[in-house]
Image (cartoon, rainbow, N blue to C red):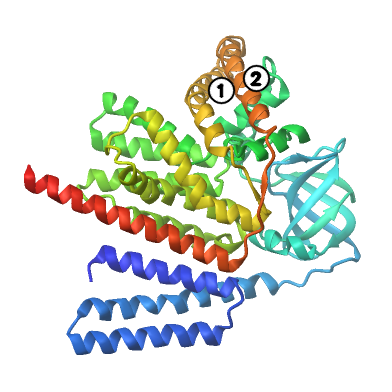
Amino acid sequence: MFPHDFCFYSGFAFLVGVAAALLGVPPFFITFAALVCVVFCFIQGYIQRDSWMQGLGICALFVLVGGWYVSVRYERFSSIEVPYNKTIQFEGCIASESRFSASSREATLHVLKPFVGDVLFRVRDGENISYGDCIRGEGKIVKPLKNSVNYFLKEGLYGTISYPKFSLTGEWRGSKIKNVMISAKQRIMNTFLTVLSRDEATFLAGLTIGAKGEFPDELVQAFKKSGTTHLVALSGYNIMIVVSVLMLLFVRLFKRRYAVITTMIFIFLFTFFAGAESSLVRAAILGCIGMVAGEVGRIYDIRQAVTVAAVGMVLVNPFVLIFDIGFQLSFAAFLAIAYCSPAFFELFRISDNPNKYMKIVIDSLSAQLMTLPIIAMQFGTFSFVGIIATFALMEFIPFTMAFGFIAAGFSFISPLVAQIPLFLVGILLKCELFLIRIFGSFPMVEWKMNSFVFVVYYGLLITFIWIYLQKRNVRNRIHIVEG
């Protein structure tokens, strides 16, 4: 078995083990199924003298590793005794950037007494809390509700402290680097607000620096109904724009190898600055793997890159694999563009180098089809105008991001000069929000998908992709022979 095959199959087996454990499959069944696969592969490999099958048997052992890893993380999380629903004296420090939620402010509080762990800390809008503040107070820790247990587990939160009596101790505990990043984002946001409305500034900050803010309910519904919620925050699409611009700049200044290394450094710094959301981390890892593979002369295999990215993120937090819909949607959309789009190109007899408008349409269609079951199963609805809305907005987004980055840079040099690109980007933002509201006026389709339909849907989609990619490979081989 080649090293790249071993990397893929062992990583995939690890993810299967993690998923099975998170879905509640008993450890006995996970162990039994894995050992059956191992024994079968080794017997077949011995009979047929096939070392590849024996290698596959070794990979199957990673199912056990995945299941064991989840049990270890579960045990570590549940080993802490939390005094739920009791009035307690607590001490801790704010471990995240505070954010608005309705009429309150929320942040993660790292509790130091009477136990050590993180909780969601909620205070009234008028009360000020900032990253790194040390707090002493009195209140109750409320256990997560049944429908939010998975979210709290994914975030590593033990419960919620709402509207307690508290005071600042005067101490500050936090990362100076993270504090500088938060202060910089706040300065950029304040500069945006000097020219743009709050909705426009929040949208632009989400696109460029990953800042999170509150939109009015009607605009939130418009994003949802138009299928453009993914535009509110930084995503893989945004990262690819940044990668393209940086590479164009650095290849003019350095040799290609150094340009790739410099771009990688900037991408990871940008990802950290923007908050390191799952879709951003995934896109950053995939982008860097692709650049490195191209530099060392290897073929960039999508399946290896996706597996490495997924395993890396699951090692950091195994609960994202099942409990984080953003994680699932980002990987599904990426796989759609990598595999489903070429199948549609073959189906419609489109060349391998289509014009950008046709590529946007096909990529949007592929992403919608690949993510539809996840959305329908999670929310019971989906937007049928999402493809049209995405196509209409994609022409504006690169220019919006470009002017946004320029304004963000000038906010540290001359806020007055920053108003020039902000005035220009304001025109684009007005058009974008207008289109989002127009498309958001269409009703959503209600469809609560069950597990059987979910499996059948993806089975048919994978079959379609396999058939047309095989046809594409045959056609390419014929062209090579004829050439």
Q: Give amino acid for label 1.
A: Ala
Residue located beneath label 2 in the image: 191
In the depicted view, which residue is nearer to us: 167 or 25? 25
Residue located beneath label 1 in the image: 408
Q: Quadrant of the N terminus?
A: bottom left
Q: Residues within 10 Å of mark 1 (few under 14, many from 20)?
A: many
State whether residue 474 appears in this view.
Answer: yes
Which residue of the protein is positioned furthest toward the front in this rendering?
348
Residue shown at 40% from the left, 29% from the top:
357
**Circles 1, 2 touching at the beta carbon (< 8 Å):** yes
Element type where label 2 sits in the image: helix
Q: Quadrant of the C terminus?
A: top left
Q: Earlier in the sequence, mark 1 or mark 2?
A: 2
Q: Residues within 10 Å of mark 2 (few under 14, many from 20)?
A: many
Left or right of 483: which side holds 293? right
- Relative to 428, residue 228 above or below: below
Residue shown at 57% from the left, 59% from the top:
320
Q: Quadrant of residue 351?
A: top left
Q: Quadrant of residue 355?
A: top left
Q: Give amino acid for label 2.
A: Thr
Residue 386: percent from left, percent from top = 57, 38
Residue 239: percent from left, percent from top = 46, 37
Left or right of 412: which side holds 269? left
Residue shown at 30% from the left, 45% from the top:
346
